[in-house]
Amino acid sequence: MKVHRETIERRSTGLYPTFHKITDDVSAIVGRSGVRDGICVVYSHHTTCSVMTQECSHDTAYNGLEYIQQDLVDILERLVPTCRKEGQYMHPGPELTEFAYSVGESKLETLNTDAHLRSVFFGRSESVVIVDGKLDMGSFGHIYFVDFDKTRIRDRQVQVQVIGE
């Protein structure tokens, strides 16, 4: 059995949820792995991010988000409103806020509770079957890495692990 691991790096915008279509990157990693039949796990260790599979909407809103992404952002805004002020959510409490400040983050950067909660809905990983050396995504499937944290521009990593024969 082969095990192959690589990291994909992306930068989020910090202005609104950032969607990165990483299907081509993941496909290239599967190709480099040499695995013909197996599983590809795409994972984020960032607790304000998600990995999801979805079709490409092709059409984009003025902010650059695909229509289906904008629809998702709009629905999430109703379910988990953007954290705009201290005390809107219980998290972050005073101890976390002071800790974050002590390690160089501004207190405003801890106002990202919405991003933490939104990532819970979609999870931080996807597993995709590999058949004949290719991701078995169907005709319309794509893999997206989503950073829900809007407090600042951030460098992020996505882990890809390929396992199989």
Image (tube, grey):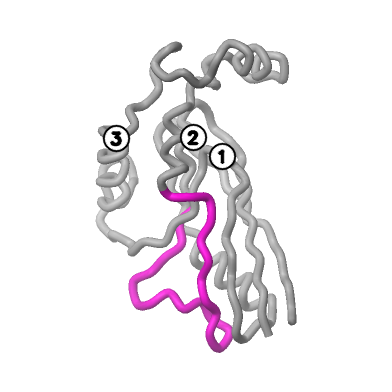
Crowding near pointer 3: few (<14 within 10 Å), some, many (20+)?
Answer: few
Q: Position of residue 21 (x, y in %)?
A: 45, 57
- Residue displayed at 56% across by 39% down: 47
Q: Are marks 2 and 1 in contact (CB under 8 Å)?
A: yes
Q: Callout 1: helix, strand or loop?
A: loop
Q: Which residues are magenta?
A: 122-145
Type of amino acid under label 2:
His
Q: Nearer the viewer, residue 57 or 38?
A: 38
Q: What's the distance in space between the residues labelled 2 and 1, CA to CA?
A: 6 Å
Type of amino acid under label 3:
Leu
Residue receiving disc 2: 116
Identify the disc placed on residue 47: 1
Q: Nearer the viewer, residue 115 or 94?
A: 94
Q: Nearer the viewer, residue 101 or 87?
A: 87
Q: Does 82 sit left or right of 7 as displayed?
A: left
Residue receiving disc 3: 79
